[in-house]
Image (spheres, helix red, strand yellow):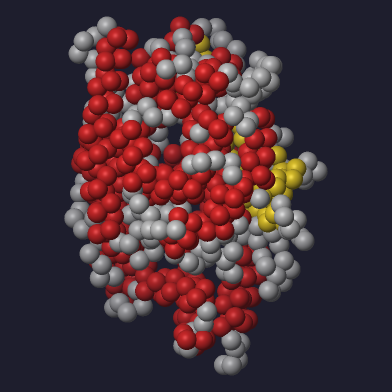
Amino acid sequence: MPRTPLPEPVRADEIEPGLDAAIAEAEAVLAEAVHLPNGATFDEVVDRIDHAYRIVGRAYGRFAAPRRFHHDPSVREAAGVASERVDRWTHGLADRADLAAVVERVARDRGGLDPEQRAWIAHWELDRRESGGGLSPADQRRLAELRDQLLTAPSRYFPALWAPVTLRIQAAEIDGVPAAIVAGFGSLDTAGGWTVTLSDPIVNAIQESAADRGLRERVARAWLHRGQPETTRIVAELAAARREIAALLGAASWTELRSARLAAGGPRAVARFLAEVEPVLTARAATELETMRAELVADTGDPDAVVEQWDWRYLEARLGAALGADAEAIREHLPLDAVLDGLARLSDTVFGVRLEPRPERPTWDADVRAVDLVDRDSGRLLGELFIDPLARDGKDGSAWMDALDPGDPGRIGEPRPPAFILAASAPPVAGGRPPTLSLLEVDQLFHEYGHVLDFALDRSRYAIVREDWIPFDWVEAPSLFLGLWASQDARVLATFARHVDTGAPPPPELFAALERRTRLNAAFRALRYLAMARVDQLLHGPQPIPIEEADREAWAVQGIPYVEGGTFVGSFLHLVGGYDAAAYGFLWDQALRDDIGTVFAADPTSPDAGAAYREHVLEVPWTEDPLDGLRRLLGRDWSVAAFLARIERG
């Protein structure tokens, strides 16, 4: 089966002509669809549209995806432009009268279509509606301008957000910071410190472990307000554009307009869910905050000390250490290679997906690992995966999954497996010791692999032409489940945790302490997701609101002081990356995740539970309602009971 061309050979000057060629090839396939005779079938038309998208989707992986990881800044810049062009092309498909006419012709007999075909048509018709075909010429022009604004915003937003954030850190400030993190700073300079480029692992390690409160504050402010004020301005522009689009299309709000593509059941269902969980979260979080404040008073000696944004992770770590779950001791038992080996082993034994190393396959960096995803029982190739686990200059400092190729079933042209990248930002090898991970980084790694499994195992006939063809309020549920399954269940951790130097498993008492630690601040952490949902609802509701006002109002949900000098909204990248009007999903998916966890309660590594989860969640086509699959897995409707029980247990 032909393989996906990798991004690495690409030079900046190859990106534009390469994408030109791919789009021209796709356009030729679309022309075939348009000029099919009147008796053409649904499959003959839609398979060509699907194939054309897959051609451009493959080009996205080669020419646009490197914007987040390529070592050459000129390639990253050109890839950002290419990403915008791909978005324009895919979002423009439903605007085309020639395609619309031929699709309408073959879709007239709905009774003759199967459920998956009808679902494809439903998404296509939503796209057509949002293109404003029934509007006046003036309103159509304005709608086109606004939609163009939505499409171009990411090419301005993400480079600003991902621009390197550097901070001076002095040797006198690093008391408590893990040695593995400090080693990654390099050698001390003549001024007795380092100029450090921040990344998720560095920020998280300092927030959790640095005894110096001033350092924690500087790091928190720098990371929270990165890319600003530009990123805040762009989010405000997007909120205003979305509101105007909703009004042009006759919807009360952007949230109402988007709800047709989401899984929760619309604004009223979301409001019921939030109203059910918010009182429990607020009451329990107040107790957790008071416990943290007492710890802060003991740490600072200030009886009036108030828990700030830069305190809570540090205080949580201190409380965890008092339970016997010291963060540094945990990290020492989580070397990267052992975690990746554990991920591969668990993927095979629990979910039936084997990771077969492909060291001969070229990659874009020496640290990238190429593997095949293979069905354990049949030997069928499910896809290709490139694991890019370490931080490096020029690479986005977070963790993510992206599709390098949607693959092709071969109904038209040659078959091709899908290909994915799983990226993390673990600290690189330093001081001669292998890199080690925090529990949060283990969570992130398995979380992103949850996305890989969800997309690689999907049994859909058709590719996802636009990212909003999948319900963004649901899409995090499988990944949240896998991340917490691996990082917070001691029975799962025990399968791969080994000391970085001795290879010995953690002592039993550390696992017992970990079980207690996972209950720390459960409500406070959940309130943070409620704050994300609140700011999203405010910005995309029926009434306009200044972005700073929405930011402050939502932040207050957490019960800690607002951080002046910028906005949280500016760094809330999900509002630009597809989760707009769906950010409640981060909290809703926690409830779904906990309900899924009941299936694994007796034995989290049960192959039977893994097979059922694979069948009813991971393999369900994106064209089906994911909650139907969840009901089949649970044998009942989903419930918040497990989520609230976890919160109240504390």
Q: Is residue 178 above or below residue 351?
A: above
* Residue nearer the viewer, 627 or 417: 627
Give the left or right position of residue 303, taking residue 295 as reference.
left
- Residue in the image at 48% along x and 35% along y: 163
- Which x, y percent locates residue 258? 34, 62
The residue closer to the viewer here, 194 or 523, is 523
All told, the count of numbered labels is 0
The residue lying at 52 percent from left, 24 percent from top is 511
The reply to whether residue 580 is visible in this rendering is no
Residue 449 visible in image: yes
The C terminus is located in which quarter?
Answer: top left
Say which of 380 and 34 sits in front. Answer: 380
Q: Position of residue 599 (x, y in %)?
A: 49, 48
Examine the image and state in which quarter residue 457 appears: bottom right
**The N terminus, quarter of image:** bottom right
**Residue 403 horizontal/vertical position (percent):** 59, 53
Q: Position of residue 98 (x, y in %)?
A: 50, 82
Q: Nearer the viewer, residue 53 or 435?
A: 435
